[in-house]
Image (cartoon, rainbow, N blue to C red):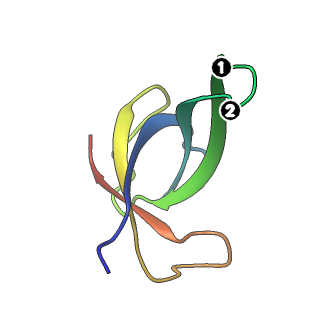
Amino acid sequence: MPKRILQGTVTSDKNDQTVTVIVERRFKHPLLHKTVRKSKKYRAHDPQNTFKVGDTVRIQECPPVSKTKRWEVVTA
């Protein structure tokens, strides 16, 4: 099974080797037929601490790195 790749914006880089990425998705509401925006936060592994708040990054699924980290930063 291929690994999922998501694109989002870094919202926090305060933790060592970790960035918090917010991923927004848009979809059409099934009943109201209106475009709805939903967002979700993911914690991603950033070994060199290269990404800062506001950067657009791509994250990929990986085996668990810690209790909350199951994603790694692929590229900016």
Residue positioned most to the front: 31
Residue positioned most to the right: 31
Query: Residue 13 is drawn in which quadrant?
Result: top right
Residue 52 visible somewhere in the drawing? yes
Which of the numbered marks, if any, corresponds to residue 12? none
Which of the numbered marks, if any, corresponds to residue 30? 2
Q: Left or right: where does residue 15 sit relative to residue 76?
A: right
Image quadrant occupied by the C terminus: top left
- Between 71 and 48, the residue placed more toward the observer is 71
Q: Percent x, y for residue 52?
A: 43, 35
Give the residue at x 45% y 83%.
63
Q: Residues within 10 Å of mark 2 (few under 14, many from 20)?
A: few
Q: Residues within 10 Å of mark 1 (few under 14, many from 20)?
A: few
Q: Left or right: where does residue 24 sit relative to residue 73?
A: right
**Helix, strand or loop at mark 1:** loop
Q: CA distance from mark 2 to mark 1?
A: 6 Å
User: Which residue is labeled 1 in the image?
Assistant: 33
Give the residue at x 37% y 32%.
56
Q: Left or right: where does residue 9 sit relative to residue 73?
A: right
Q: Percent x, y for residue 29?
A: 68, 28
**Amino acid residing under circle 2:** Pro
Give the residue at x 61% y 45%.
14
**Amino acid residing under circle 1:** His
Looking at the image, is 30 positioned above or below residue 33?
Answer: below
Image quadrant occupied by the N terminus: bottom left
**Helix, strand or loop at mark 2:** loop
Q: Percent x, y for residue 33?
A: 65, 19
Looking at the image, is 14 positioned above or below residue 27?
Answer: below
Residue positioned most to the left: 75
Looking at the image, is 22 positioned above or below residue 34?
Answer: below
